[in-house]
Amino acid sequence: MRLVLLGVPGSGKGTQGEVLAAHYGIRHVSSGDLLRHEVAAHTPLGEEVKSFIDDGELVPDELVFSVVAGALDDAARAQGYILDGFPRTLAQAQRARASAPPAGIAVDAVVYLDLSDKVARSRLSGRAAEGRVDDGDSVIERRLAVYHHATQPLLGFYRALRLLRAIDANAPIPQVTATIIAAIDASAA
Ligand code: AP5
């Protein structure tokens, strides 16, 4: 199974990605986690991407593809993957789709975690104490704006491909998980 999680920052992509990966026995591949790992390890790539992440801007595509493609290689050969944070722009989605397996990145379903900016803000600022550098108020605003400008158009792209499954992301975490699983299993049946 190959899933994509889409949604505004704070909608629960990372949270649900981990739970769903355990449920389906597949890999959770988070582009944000992979990029933050590079930053924390002070790799040359990490040095290159740090300021984009700190400012809430998108990391350039070539750098993102180099990180994600490596991580997906093994996952694609195994049972599949859950992509969290990637693709994030139409260009990334089109490029990922154009290079479908065995060379590239296929998608069976896209889970859209539907959440208002207001609730997303409150979740992200509540998490700020945990130390993620991009959870300060002004960077949260920039991440939300970048999402609406660059990522939201993906909803129409995946809807046209009949891959989009919209989920109410306002509910408590276990309830959101159960709704996603029901939607995925229904569409796979
Ligand atoms: P990324 O790491 O992808 O961050 P994001 O999209 O901004 O999303 P978050 O991780 O903040 O939120 P989430 O939706 O995963 O929610 P979470 O489960 O954490 O990207 C970070 C940066 O990396 C980007 O700004 C960019 O610079 C770069 N980047 C990454 N991918 C890129 C790409 N493809 N192209 C270019 N640049 C890229 O939950 C948030 C909080 O809410 C948590 O505290 C959680 O406990 C809580 N929560 C979750 N669900 C619920 C619930 N149902 N009820 C109550 N609380 C909940």
Image (cartoon, helix red, strand yellow):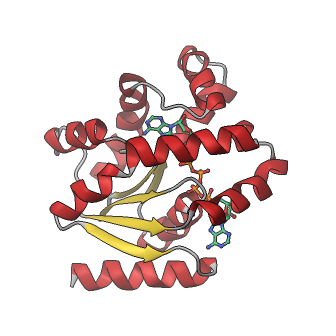
Farthest-out residue, right: 129
Q: Quadrant of the C terminus?
A: bottom left
- Which residue is at a point 33% across and 77% down the rendered structure image? 184
Q: Is residue 136 above or below residue 79?
A: above
Between 126 and 41, the one nearer to me in the picture: 126
* Residue 3 image point, x, y percent: 34, 61
* Residue 20 image point, x, y percent: 48, 70
Number of numbered labels in the structure image: 0
Q: Is residue 50 above or below residue 144?
A: above
Q: Quadrant of residue 123?
A: bottom right
Left or right: residue 143 versus residue 66 is right
Q: Is residue 107 visible?
A: no
Left or right: residue 118 versus residue 80 is right
Q: Quadrant of residue 95?
A: top left
Between 37 and 124, the one nearer to me in the picture: 124
- Which residue is at a point 39% across and 47% down the rendered structure image? 151
Left or right: residue 164 versus residue 138 is left
- Which residue is at a point 51% across and 69% down the rendered structure image? 22
Q: Is residue 112 above or below residue 97?
A: below
Q: Is residue 173 visible?
A: yes
- Which residue is at a point 74% across and 44% down the rendered structure image? 137
Q: Quadrant of the N terminus?
A: bottom left
Between 158 and 145, the one nearer to me in the picture: 145
Left or right: residue 159 versus residue 149 is left
* Residue 62 image point, x, y percent: 36, 23
* Residue 64 image point, x, y percent: 42, 31
